[in-house]
Amino acid sequence: MSQPLNFSPPDDGEEIARAEVYGLLAALFVAPPTPELYAGLQVAVTQAPAAGAFLESNWGALVAATRRLPLAAINDEYALLFQGIGKPEVFLFGSWFIAGHLNEKPLVDLRHALAALGLERPAGVLQTEDHIAGLCEVMRYLIAGDDVGVSNLAAQRRFFDRHLRPWNEALWDAISAHPAADFYAAVAGFGRDFFAVEAQGFDLLDA
Protein backbone atom coordinates (compact mmCIF):
# COMPACT_ATOMS: atom_id res chain seq x y z
CA MET A 1 0.00 0.00 0.00
CA SER A 2 1.26 3.47 -0.83
CA GLN A 3 2.35 5.60 2.09
CA PRO A 4 0.59 8.97 2.45
CA LEU A 5 2.60 11.94 1.29
CA ASN A 6 2.15 14.49 4.07
CA PHE A 7 2.18 18.16 3.17
CA SER A 8 3.87 20.30 5.82
CA PRO A 9 2.98 18.07 8.77
CA PRO A 10 3.07 19.76 12.17
CA ASP A 11 6.18 17.89 13.35
CA ASP A 12 8.28 18.83 10.31
CA GLY A 13 10.59 21.80 10.50
CA GLU A 14 9.78 24.67 8.15
CA GLU A 15 13.09 24.27 6.35
CA ILE A 16 12.52 20.57 5.74
CA ALA A 17 9.05 21.34 4.38
CA ARG A 18 10.45 24.01 2.04
CA ALA A 19 13.11 21.66 0.73
CA GLU A 20 10.50 18.95 0.15
CA VAL A 21 8.29 21.28 -1.88
CA TYR A 22 11.21 22.30 -4.09
CA GLY A 23 12.03 18.63 -4.52
CA LEU A 24 8.44 17.85 -5.46
CA LEU A 25 8.31 20.63 -8.06
CA ALA A 26 11.63 19.45 -9.49
CA ALA A 27 10.30 15.90 -9.81
CA LEU A 28 7.07 17.02 -11.48
CA PHE A 29 8.82 19.22 -14.04
CA VAL A 30 11.79 17.06 -14.98
CA ALA A 31 9.38 14.33 -16.16
CA PRO A 32 5.82 13.15 -15.59
CA PRO A 33 5.28 11.75 -12.09
CA THR A 34 6.64 8.30 -11.51
CA PRO A 35 4.09 5.64 -10.52
CA GLU A 36 5.39 5.91 -6.94
CA LEU A 37 5.02 9.71 -6.82
CA TYR A 38 1.61 9.52 -8.49
CA ALA A 39 0.42 7.01 -5.88
CA GLY A 40 1.82 9.15 -3.08
CA LEU A 41 0.03 12.26 -4.31
CA GLN A 42 -3.26 10.39 -4.56
CA VAL A 43 -3.22 9.64 -0.83
CA ALA A 44 -1.61 12.91 0.24
CA VAL A 45 -2.91 14.85 3.21
CA THR A 46 -4.66 17.98 1.94
CA GLN A 47 -5.54 19.73 5.21
CA ALA A 48 -2.82 22.12 6.33
CA PRO A 49 -1.78 22.14 10.00
CA ALA A 50 -3.24 25.65 10.33
CA ALA A 51 -6.76 26.15 8.98
CA GLY A 52 -6.89 28.44 5.96
CA ALA A 53 -3.16 28.25 5.29
CA PHE A 54 -2.21 30.09 2.10
CA LEU A 55 -0.97 27.00 0.21
CA GLU A 56 -3.80 24.72 1.29
CA SER A 57 -6.25 25.48 -1.53
CA ASN A 58 -3.87 24.98 -4.45
CA TRP A 59 -2.27 21.97 -2.81
CA GLY A 60 -5.75 20.46 -2.50
CA ALA A 61 -6.38 21.20 -6.19
CA LEU A 62 -3.16 19.43 -7.15
CA VAL A 63 -4.04 16.35 -5.11
CA ALA A 64 -7.57 16.39 -6.53
CA ALA A 65 -6.20 16.50 -10.10
CA THR A 66 -4.00 13.50 -9.32
CA ARG A 67 -6.98 11.57 -8.00
CA ARG A 68 -9.14 12.53 -10.98
CA LEU A 69 -6.69 11.87 -13.83
CA PRO A 70 -5.11 8.55 -14.79
CA LEU A 71 -1.32 8.52 -14.91
CA ALA A 72 -1.39 7.88 -18.67
CA ALA A 73 -3.31 11.13 -19.22
CA ILE A 74 -0.76 13.06 -17.13
CA ASN A 75 2.06 11.50 -19.15
CA ASP A 76 0.37 12.59 -22.37
CA GLU A 77 -0.19 16.10 -21.01
CA TYR A 78 3.47 16.45 -20.03
CA ALA A 79 4.58 15.33 -23.50
CA LEU A 80 2.18 17.71 -25.25
CA LEU A 81 3.09 20.74 -23.15
CA PHE A 82 6.81 20.36 -22.62
CA GLN A 83 8.23 17.85 -25.11
CA GLY A 84 6.81 18.86 -28.47
CA ILE A 85 8.72 17.97 -31.60
CA GLY A 86 10.89 20.99 -32.35
CA LYS A 87 9.36 23.77 -30.25
CA PRO A 88 7.38 22.73 -27.16
CA GLU A 89 4.11 24.38 -26.30
CA VAL A 90 5.58 25.74 -23.07
CA PHE A 91 9.29 26.26 -22.41
CA LEU A 92 10.59 25.45 -18.94
CA PHE A 93 13.84 27.41 -19.25
CA GLY A 94 14.66 30.70 -17.59
CA SER A 95 16.56 32.07 -20.57
CA TRP A 96 13.44 31.83 -22.72
CA PHE A 97 11.37 33.96 -20.38
CA ILE A 98 14.11 36.44 -19.44
CA ALA A 99 15.88 36.92 -22.78
CA GLY A 100 13.37 35.53 -25.32
CA HIS A 101 15.74 32.82 -26.54
CA LEU A 102 17.35 29.66 -25.21
CA ASN A 103 21.00 29.51 -24.16
CA GLU A 104 21.30 33.25 -23.65
CA LYS A 105 23.13 35.40 -21.09
CA PRO A 106 20.90 34.33 -18.16
CA LEU A 107 22.19 30.78 -18.65
CA VAL A 108 25.79 32.00 -18.67
CA ASP A 109 25.18 33.96 -15.46
CA LEU A 110 23.57 30.91 -13.89
CA ARG A 111 26.53 28.70 -14.76
CA HIS A 112 28.87 31.17 -13.09
CA ALA A 113 26.65 31.13 -9.98
CA LEU A 114 26.58 27.33 -9.91
CA ALA A 115 30.34 27.14 -10.29
CA ALA A 116 30.73 29.51 -7.34
CA LEU A 117 28.58 27.13 -5.31
CA GLY A 118 30.65 24.15 -6.43
CA LEU A 119 27.76 22.73 -8.46
CA GLU A 120 27.57 21.50 -12.04
CA ARG A 121 25.07 19.74 -14.27
CA PRO A 122 25.12 15.98 -13.54
CA ALA A 123 26.31 13.67 -16.30
CA GLY A 124 23.42 12.39 -18.39
CA VAL A 125 21.14 15.36 -17.74
CA LEU A 126 20.08 16.74 -21.12
CA GLN A 127 18.30 19.91 -19.98
CA THR A 128 20.37 23.06 -19.56
CA GLU A 129 20.83 24.32 -16.04
CA ASP A 130 18.12 26.99 -16.34
CA HIS A 131 15.36 24.36 -16.54
CA ILE A 132 12.87 24.95 -13.73
CA ALA A 133 13.46 21.44 -12.38
CA GLY A 134 17.20 22.02 -12.09
CA LEU A 135 16.72 25.38 -10.40
CA CYS A 136 14.33 23.85 -7.87
CA GLU A 137 16.91 21.16 -7.14
CA VAL A 138 19.51 23.85 -6.47
CA MET A 139 17.14 25.59 -4.05
CA ARG A 140 16.49 22.27 -2.32
CA TYR A 141 20.24 21.82 -1.89
CA LEU A 142 20.71 25.37 -0.59
CA ILE A 143 18.06 24.68 2.04
CA ALA A 144 18.88 21.12 3.04
CA GLY A 145 22.58 20.72 2.24
CA ASP A 146 25.06 19.88 4.99
CA ASP A 147 27.66 22.56 4.14
CA VAL A 148 26.43 25.67 5.97
CA GLY A 149 29.01 27.72 4.11
CA VAL A 150 26.98 27.07 0.95
CA SER A 151 23.54 26.00 2.15
CA ASN A 152 22.32 29.02 4.07
CA LEU A 153 19.57 31.62 3.95
CA ALA A 154 21.72 34.31 2.32
CA ALA A 155 22.67 31.97 -0.52
CA GLN A 156 19.05 30.93 -0.96
CA ARG A 157 17.92 34.52 -1.27
CA ARG A 158 20.66 35.46 -3.74
CA PHE A 159 19.91 32.46 -5.94
CA PHE A 160 16.14 32.89 -5.81
CA ASP A 161 16.28 36.63 -6.51
CA ARG A 162 18.70 36.25 -9.41
CA HIS A 163 17.57 33.07 -11.12
CA LEU A 164 13.92 32.40 -10.20
CA ARG A 165 12.18 35.61 -9.16
CA PRO A 166 12.54 37.35 -12.57
CA TRP A 167 10.57 34.75 -14.53
CA ASN A 168 8.64 32.28 -12.42
CA GLU A 169 5.36 34.22 -12.70
CA ALA A 170 5.59 34.17 -16.49
CA LEU A 171 6.10 30.41 -16.39
CA TRP A 172 3.05 29.81 -14.22
CA ASP A 173 1.01 32.11 -16.48
CA ALA A 174 2.11 30.27 -19.62
CA ILE A 175 1.20 26.88 -18.20
CA SER A 176 -2.10 27.97 -16.70
CA ALA A 177 -3.20 29.69 -19.92
CA HIS A 178 -2.60 26.68 -22.16
CA PRO A 179 -5.90 24.99 -23.06
CA ALA A 180 -4.38 21.52 -22.74
CA ALA A 181 -3.10 22.10 -19.20
CA ASP A 182 -5.08 20.21 -16.58
CA PHE A 183 -2.82 18.45 -14.10
CA TYR A 184 -0.03 20.90 -14.83
CA ALA A 185 -2.36 23.85 -14.42
CA ALA A 186 -2.83 22.59 -10.87
CA VAL A 187 0.93 22.19 -10.47
CA ALA A 188 1.40 25.75 -11.75
CA GLY A 189 -1.18 27.09 -9.30
CA PHE A 190 0.61 25.45 -6.41
CA GLY A 191 4.01 26.57 -7.70
CA ARG A 192 2.79 30.15 -8.03
CA ASP A 193 1.59 30.27 -4.42
CA PHE A 194 4.69 28.57 -3.05
CA PHE A 195 7.04 30.92 -4.91
CA ALA A 196 4.99 33.89 -3.70
CA VAL A 197 5.49 32.73 -0.12
CA GLU A 198 9.21 32.29 -0.77
CA ALA A 199 9.53 35.77 -2.28
CA GLN A 200 7.65 37.34 0.62
CA GLY A 201 9.84 35.51 3.13
CA PHE A 202 13.03 36.71 1.47
CA ASP A 203 11.70 40.28 1.31
CA LEU A 204 11.02 40.21 5.04
CA LEU A 205 14.69 39.56 5.73
CA ASP A 206 15.32 43.26 5.07
CA ALA A 207 12.31 44.49 7.02
Image (tube, rainbow, N blue to C red):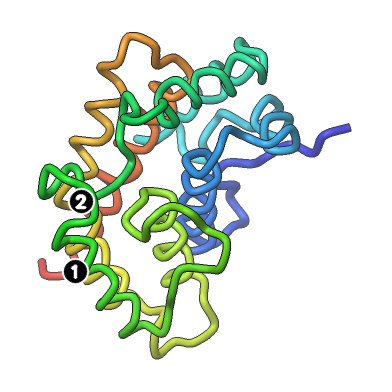
Residue 85 vs residue 100, the one in the foreground: 85
Tag 2 residue: 95
Vertical placement of residue 176 versus 49, above or below = above
Q: Position of residue 154 (x, y in %)?
A: 27, 77
Q: Is residue 163 above or below residue 1?
A: below
Q: Amino acid at mark 2?
A: Ser
Q: Quick check: can you spot residue 57? A: no
Residue 177 at x, y = what percent?
A: 25, 17
Label 1 sits on residue = 205
Q: Are marks 2 and 1 in contact (CB under 8 Å)?
A: no
* Horizontal side, residue 133 vs residue 174: left or right: right
Which dot marks residue 164? none
| Within-10-Å neighbours for mark 2: few <14, some 14–19, many 20+ | many
Q: Please state if 167 lies on the left or on the right of 133 as rendered.
A: left
Q: Is residue 129 left or right of residue 95?
A: right
Question: Which is in the foreground here, disc 2 or disc 1?
Answer: 2
Quadrant location of the C terminus in the rendered image: bottom left
Which x, y percent locates residue 135? 37, 58
Q: Position of residue 171 (x, y in %)?
A: 25, 36
The answer to which quarter of the image holds residue 119 is bottom left
* Disc with the residue nearer the chain's start (2 vs 1): 2
Q: CA distance from mark 2 to mark 1?
A: 27 Å
Instruction: Report helix, strand or loop for mark 1.
Output: loop
Which quarter of the figure is the N terminus placed in?
A: top right
The residue lying furthest to the front in this view is 86
In the image, what residue occupies the spot 48% across and 54% down?
126
Where 29 sits versus 105, above or below? above
Q: Is residue 188 visible?
A: yes
Q: Is 90 rendered above or below residue 67?
A: below
Three-letter amino acid code at the position of disc 1? Leu
